[in-house]
Amino acid sequence: MNDQFIQLAYLVAAVLLIRGLSGLGSPKTAPRGNLTAAAGMLIAIVATLLMKGVVSYTVIIAGVVVGSTIGAVLALRIQMTAMPQMVALLNGFGGGASALVASAELLNYMREGSEPTGIVPTAIVLGILIGGVTFTGSLIAFAKLQELLKGAPLVYAGQRFVNALLSVALVGAGVMMVMTPLDLNPFYVVLCLSLLLGVLLVIPIGGADMPVVISLLNSYSGLAACATGFVLGNSSLVISGSLVGASGIILTKIMCKAMNRSLANVLFGAFGAVDQATAAGGGSTDGRTAKAYTPEDAAVIFSNSRSCIVVPGYGMAVAQAQHAVRELADTLEEKGISVKFAIHPVAGRMPGHMNVLLAEADVPYDKLVPMDEINREFPETDVALVIGANDVVNPDARTDKGSPIYGMPILDVDRAQHVFVIKRSMNPGFAGVQNPLFFNDNTMMIFGDAKGTVLALVKSVRDLV
């Protein structure tokens, strides 16, 4: 196949990838953007398969069949509530694939007895290093999200020193590998230390920081793919990897801004490792007690309101209550009550988690209002309904300088006339701190599973004449 034709195909693919990524910036254009990017990637793959360097189409077709089968099964069986775990796992697969390709290319040089030159040795090291860190780091993130490991930070004495020492050793081995690329000893050291460092970098990160971690690991997977593109001399892979890496970094910055924390604090601050004995207490510091209401009690206030803002959180995702929440919104609107949804940037376990769940339940996009816009409406709102959210509605973030979440932008639900909070218990959120919102005079707790409680609330509202 003519090399010029292949390069032209790569150029078209790059344009489509950029257009697709641009489309993902808005909910209205996201489906079209996703399809555009997919078309670009398909063109890039077909162009690559038409190159003269393909050794065996049989092996490639077998890989496509196996991979497509696994992907189809996962797509059909994975619930939307488990999407954060899925994204973490796919990030890991991307990083692992890049590390394997870079390693295979190095071994191929050794088999042929030729030494890589130019930028290739450095690209091989980066592909293995970043890919290895991404692979094991993503597996740990998956395990935390899947609750195979505890979501709380795992810390130990001298942790930062150990990580720094490993990083220095990894850089040293990487330099040796670039200088003597055909020596397998530095290669083994880089590979093993990369895999180990990925584990050690993620285990001290608390569950509340998972949106930041997932977006960062997504960036890592893109950077690993970009490095592998330089290894293979494939411009399409370089461009697509650069786009993923850059967009992941931008998203990570947005997530950190939404939490009013630096990336260094997220990675090394062990957010959530606080005094759990104090945090888990059921009462507030000033002796107030929470007021428990039933769905029947709450229905009376809902029915007499004019406006309601729903604040979804991870509890809604765990209970798979998004369809019940949509039913509640429809029921309230049938009674002439205005309903909107307040979306905090880091609510849930991945960027856009709440948007994805509510979209699955066919909640109109124009009812999903970002935090900066919805906050001004809370003082004029009759009822705020918090479903499984905790840290993103904690007023201590505004007032208590001693709180670990102080300075984090929150949803100002405490300023609504009435606040209902649906929770299983009084246990704190992933940040590990108690929420004084639960003890305010205008707050009423409704204890129970989110899905069952919302459905009971729907029935009670409908039963009222």
Image: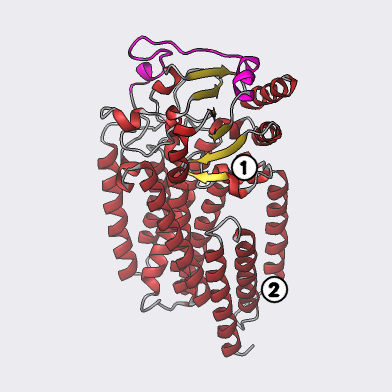
Specify the label residue 57 is tagged with: 2
* Residue 110 among those drawn in magenta: no
* Quadrant in the picture for residue 37: bottom right
The colour mode here is secondary structure
Marks 2 and 1: CB-CB under 8 Å? no
Q: Position of residue 81 (x, y in %)?
A: 62, 39
* Mark in the foreground, 2 or 1: 1
Number of numbered discs on residues: 2
Mark 2 neighbour density, 10 Å: few (under 14) some (14–19) many (20 or more): few
Q: Which residues are magenta?
A: 275-303
Position of residue 150 relative to residue 283, above or below, is below
| First reached walking from the N terminus: tag 2 or tag 1 | 2
Q: Position of residue 33 (x, y in %)?
A: 60, 64
Q: Amino acid at mark 1?
A: Leu
Which one is nearer the viewer's eye here, 202 or 111? Answer: 202
Q: Residue at x 42, y 67 (%)?
A: 124
Q: For the C terminus, which image quadrant?
A: top right
Q: Amino acid at mark 2?
A: Tyr
Q: Residue at x 47, y 30 (%)?
A: 150
Distance from label 2 to label 1 (Cα)? 40 Å
Q: Is residue 251 left or right of residue 369?
A: left
Which one is nearer the viewer's eye here, 365 or 135? Answer: 365
Specify the label residue 357 is tagged with: 1
Can residue 27 be seen here? The reply is: yes
Q: Position of residue 454 (x, y in %)?
A: 65, 26
* Residue 289 among those drawn in magenta: yes
Position of residue 384 relative to residue 95, above or below, is above
Q: Is residue 351 left or right of residue 256?
A: right
Q: Residue at x 66, y 27 (%)?
A: 451
